[in-house]
Image: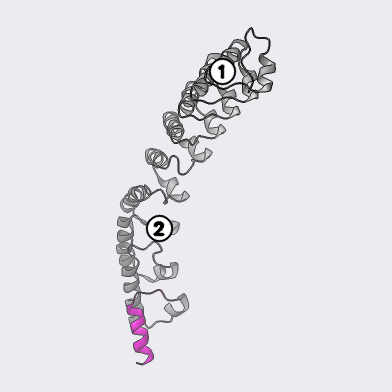
Amino acid sequence: MNNKQLLQQYVDTGVQLPEYQVRSLPPDFLKTYLRKRIIATENSSTGLADYEFELITPDQRFQYWMKRVEAGVELPEYQIRSLPPDLLETYLRKRLIATKDRFKKLSDYELELLTPNQRFQYWMQKSGIIPISNKEFELLTQNDRFKYAVKRAEKWDYISNKQFELLTPDQRFQCAMKVAENRGVISDKQFELLTPDQPDQRFQYTMKVVEEGGGISDRLFKLLTPDHRFQYAMKRKEKGGGISNEQFLINNHQVQIPDRV
């Protein structure tokens, strides 16, 4: 078997060749090579190399894109930018479906191209898997921010302090109660963001935490009103727990003193 036959045999396999070899292929071999490579990469995660994509015809590019888009496979950013509008819309829709797999996610560029509603759907399906950035959270509508925060609470994976701050006062309270309901606790910063002039919100959250078997830090204990501190301590005792030494010292002027931890 001569060199030409060996090369023909290798080209027919559809296996990728290094760029310098591809660019040195005779025209007929190059045409066959590119056709075989398109077939070989239709559903693969890697796809054509940049130098291969550069060499295919416009019609081949479109057919290649059609196959890749239908498979929901990620395209490089420079190729996404070149997609016709109708194909781009299909591409993003297919990518949203493909990334329902917990191990797959959209690229930053793909996220930028989504509509607000698509972006929200994506973050909701990834809730508990990929945390949303503060920047992305800001792009959500106020109602969608709250839905996302509640969904995260249900997954035992909570939003950042910055995101909590972007919620309305009522949404913060409802979010905090959902966290407590799922046997979690919000951060000290988030507790402080619960409306200071409505101490009952902080108290209701605190009592829910205790009801679910938890407790609060000494720092947060100081933020409660004297009466709420006392009720908190009594509830802890009722649930078979107690309060810390510092909380005991803060609370020791009350009429009844629960047992210390």
Query: Where does residue 46 sit, x and y in percent of width and height?
Result: 41, 63
| Mark 1: few/some/many CA within 10 Å (<14, 14-19, 20+) | some
The residue lying toward the viewer, choosing from 108 and 83, is 108
Left or right of residue 6, residue 160 in this image: right
Q: Which residue is mark 2?
A: 75
Query: Where does residue 170 sit, x and y in percent of width and height?
Result: 48, 21
Q: Which quarter of the figure has residue 235?
A: top right
The residue lying toward the viewer, choosing from 143 and 254, is 254
SS class, disc 1: helix
Give the spatial CA distance, label 1 vs label 2: 59 Å
Q: Which residues are magenta?
A: 1-16
Query: Does residue 198 appear in this view?
Result: no
Give whichever of discs 1 and 2 has the lower sequence position.
2
Which residue occupies 60% across, 21% down? Answer: 242
Specify the farthest residue to the bottom: 2
Query: Does residue 229 appear in this view?
Result: yes
Which residue occupies 42% across, 28% down? Answer: 143
- In magenta segment, residue 3: yes
Q: Which residue is mark 1?
A: 237
The residue lying toward the viewer, choosing from 56 and 188, is 188
Marks 1 and 2: which is nearer the front? 1
Q: Which quarter of the figure has residue 186?
A: top right
Query: Where does residue 53 sit, x and y in percent of width and height?
Result: 40, 67
Do the CB atoms of the residues marked 1 and 2 lie less than 8 Å apart?
no
Viewport quadrant of the N terminus = bottom left
Amino acid at dot 2: Leu
Amino acid at dot 1: Lys
User: Could you tell me what secondary structure mostly forms the magenta stretch?
Assistant: helix
All told, the count of numbered labels is 2
Above or below, comparing residue 22 to residue 77 in the picture = below
Query: Where does residue 33 sit, x and y in percent of width and height?
Result: 35, 76
